[in-house]
Each structure stands twice: as structure tokens, then as C-alpha cells.
Amino acid sequence: MPVPGEDAFRADVRGWLAANLAGEFAPLVGSGGPGREHEFADERMAWERRLGAAGWIGLGWPESDGGRGLPWRHQVIFHEEYARAGAPARVGHIGEQLLGPTLLMFGTAEQRARFLPGVLAGTQLWCQGYSEPGAGSDLAAVSTRARLDADQWHLDGQKVWTSLAQFADWCFVLARTDPAAERHHGLSYLLVPMRQPGISVRPIVQLTGTSEFNEVFFDDARAAAADIVGAPGDGWRVAMGTLAVERGESTFGQQLGFQREFEAVLAAARANGAIDDPDLSARLVEAWVGLQVMRYTAMATLGQPAAAVPGAAGLAGTAGLAGTAGMAGVGANVNKLLWAPWHQRLGELAVDVAGPAATVGGPGYELDNAQRLFLYTRADTIYGGSNEIQRNIIAERGLGLPREPR
Ligand SMILES: Cc1cc2nc3c(=O)[nH]c(=O)nc-3n(C[C@H](O)[C@H](O)[C@H](O)COP(=O)(O)OP(=O)(O)OC[C@H]3O[C@@H](n4cnc5c(N)ncnc54)[C@H](O)[C@@H]3O)c2cc1C
């Protein structure tokens, strides 16, 4: 298919969103996202299917795998228009942004043919099963075991902080398949169906009072022998490929919501007079400057060609992978270090602008947006690799400084 011109594409996206965020989907405007994933869950799953049916999922994926093969600038345009329209937070982003690119890089033709259509259609939701109670930053310590018996893997163990597991049909699980091998050796990357007797999902209540993430228990859970990405014992390489995408993509998608959140804080400061406070107005200016710095840094790093990323040749234009190719391979880590503390400071600013009203809460009170932003952003410097870990990666891989003792 010929690539449409950018202006025509923008008009197309804008027109489609205006026509479809109407009727049954009109109440979804502004819904979902951090601290609010419980909102309109069923309706947002239906919205995911509507997006898929119209071809808005997998814009950058190769056409041979069902995507639209569009350049990254078109993906930026889609995200901009999506944010501008206030379209709901996606429930399918883990499948589209993490699992899909991983299968494009490491999956077999059969796996791509079997799993990608469900992600593209918005009918198959995924979650990410990496972290465990004893393995977060130190992911190589994963202890969930998987044993191959005839035509099935048998899994036992526990994952934690598994976002959106309550909605997911499938989970990509990092599991230890060779108990004799140490650390990152002996791990495998398995595709595990969530709806089976061997899996139980227990929600974890967060500071916001809502539950986006969960504990996931595997008690002789099963996966088909063929549902392994890469070879047995090769899971670390595959898992790192997914993480390279995660850091880039998450920055890319979130940028656009940040502007909207900033504008809400600015509007609140104008409305209640907080803008006349010199300290608060200086912090508003700093927040705006930070927004510009992040935007231009992300545009510069995410637009790099992906050719330098091993295995990513077919994915030129996929924003996250491209990000890892910039800045000596640590561009996406730099982006995370820019946006996570910035977003936390915006949350602090939001409650300071609200003043004493921000302290009203507790049982019987709904959190308002400023309170939710303040509370949820505590997580920003943890998930997707904590800030300390990002600095270690930049130090060791970007600057060539001595490695930390392991
Ligand atoms: C909102 C949210 C959603 C998440 N979603 C998912 C998900 O869907 N799937 C999933 O698998 N995981 C998910 N996670 C888990 C996330 O990846 C981990 O929380 C993260 O990797 C940190 O691991 P940990 O919590 O075990 O902390 P730890 O690794 O125990 O770290 C504790 C503290 O020690 C610091 N630290 C650890 N090692 C070092 C070091 N070598 N040098 C310096 N400092 C160090 C850390 O920076 C941190 O401050 C999510 C987390 C959050 C908050």
C-alpha cells in the first residue's frame, strides 16, 4: 500500500476518531489509564476491537505480518490525534507494543501467524510476566519453573506486579527451564494462556485505591510445547529485546498525555489564583520547559534508524527499537530518566496548586485528578526499570564506566 501523505493521514485519523468516539463510545472520552484502569473496562475492550477492525493497531508493523508498514512519523501523528481527541487509555497496549514487536524480532513464522492477528484485531489481550517477589531489578533471579513433559510445559511459581493480568487472555512469561543453569542462563520465554485452572490472579491495591496490577500464581499451569519464543534457555535474550521496546514505546506514547496533564494543572492554577504565587508560577514554567525538552529529545532519539539493533532490521520505524539505537544505544534510557522524575514533579505541583483541598480524601471520597496524578506518579521511577537501574545501564553501556559488582 502506498504511504499516505502526512496531512491526509492526520485528517483521516482525526475524522475517524470524531466519528467513532460517539454514541456508545462517547462516555469513554478521557477514561482509563494509570489509577483508572477499572473505568469502563468492558467498553474499552470493545473500543480495542473497534480500533483493530479499522486498522489502527500495528501501524508500524510490516504489511507481510498484517501491519500497515507506516513510517514512525505517521505513528506520532496517530498518537497525537488520539491524545487530542481524549480517546480512552488502551487495554491492548502490552500486546501491541511489547509482545507483537518481540514476535516480529524473535518469533517463528507460525507464531507470528498464530498470535499477531488477535493483537491486530484487538481481540487478544496480553500481560507481561517478568517480575517476581525475589526478582525485579535483578530479573536474572527469576525462579518460576517450567518443565517440558511430552507436548506441554508445566509451570510452577509466582509473578508479581503483573499489569492488567485481570483482563489478559495470554501472558508472556520468563521462566527457568534449566534448574541447573545459573542466573540468566536456563531461562525461557513462554506464551501462556491465562484462562486455565493452573493460574490464579490476585489483585494488589495501590496507593490510588485501585488495582491495575496483580499477583499471578502458577500451580501446574500449562503451555503448549511449541509456545516458546526462541530456543529453550534463550529467554534472556528475548526478554531483553522486549525491554528495549518497552522503554522506548512507553516514553513515546506517554509524551502526548503529559501535555494534557500539564494544561490541566495550568488551568487549575489560573482558576484558583495559585498562578500568582511566585514559587508555583516558577514551577509551572519549569514544568513547561521540561515538557519541551522531553518532546524534542524523544523526537530526536525515537526517529533514529533501527538498523543498529540486532534483529530489528524488519522494524525500521518502530519507535521503541529505534530509540535504543540512538545515543550509543541508551537513548530510551535517557528518555525514561527525563520523563519519570518530571512526571513526579508535575504530580507534586498539581497538589500544591490545589492547596488544602488536595488533603481531603480517605474513605468515601473519590480522588480527583490532581491527587491521582500525585499518588500514581510515585510508580513512574520504578516500573519499566527503576531510575537507579537506568543510570547503571547508561553508565555501563553508554559511557563505558566500570561495571557494578554483581
Ligand atoms: C505500576 C507498575 C507496573 C508494573 N507492571 C509490571 C508488569 O506488567 N510486569 C512485570 O513483570 N513487572 C511489572 N512491574 C514491576 C517492575 O518492573 C519492578 O517493580 C521493577 O523492575 C523494580 O523491581 P522491584 O519492585 O522488585 O524492586 P527491587 O529490584 O527490589 O528494587 C528496590 C530498590 O533498590 C534499587 N536497586 C535494586 N538494584 C539496584 C542496583 N543494582 N543498583 C542501584 N539500585 C538498585 C531499585 O532502584 C529500587 O529503588 C510493575 C511495577 C509497577 C510499579
Image (cartoon, rainbow, N blue to C red):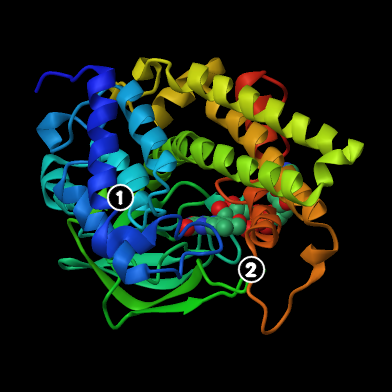
Decide if residue 145 is in sight here.
yes
Residue at the (35%, 65%) spot, across then down: 146
- Crowd rating for badge 1 (residues with CA inside 10 Å; few <14, some 14–19, many 20+): some
Q: Is residue 276 left or right of residue 240?
A: right
Q: Which residue is mark 1?
A: 232
Q: Which residue is mark 2?
A: 208
Find out if the beta carbon at label 1 lies less than 8 Å from the nearest ligand 1 atom: no
- Crowd rating for badge 2 (residues with CA inside 10 Å; few <14, some 14–19, many 20+): some
The location of residue 168, given as percent across then percent down, is 33, 66
Work out whether residue 362 or residue 244 is closer to the camera in this orientation and state it: 362
Image quadrant of ligand 1? bottom right
The location of residue 131, given as percent across then percent down, is 52, 59
Q: Is residue 330 left or right of residue 358?
A: left
Q: Secondary structure at mark 2?
A: loop
Residue 219: give its label.
none
Work out whether residue 278 or residue 239 is closer to the camera in this orientation and state it: 278
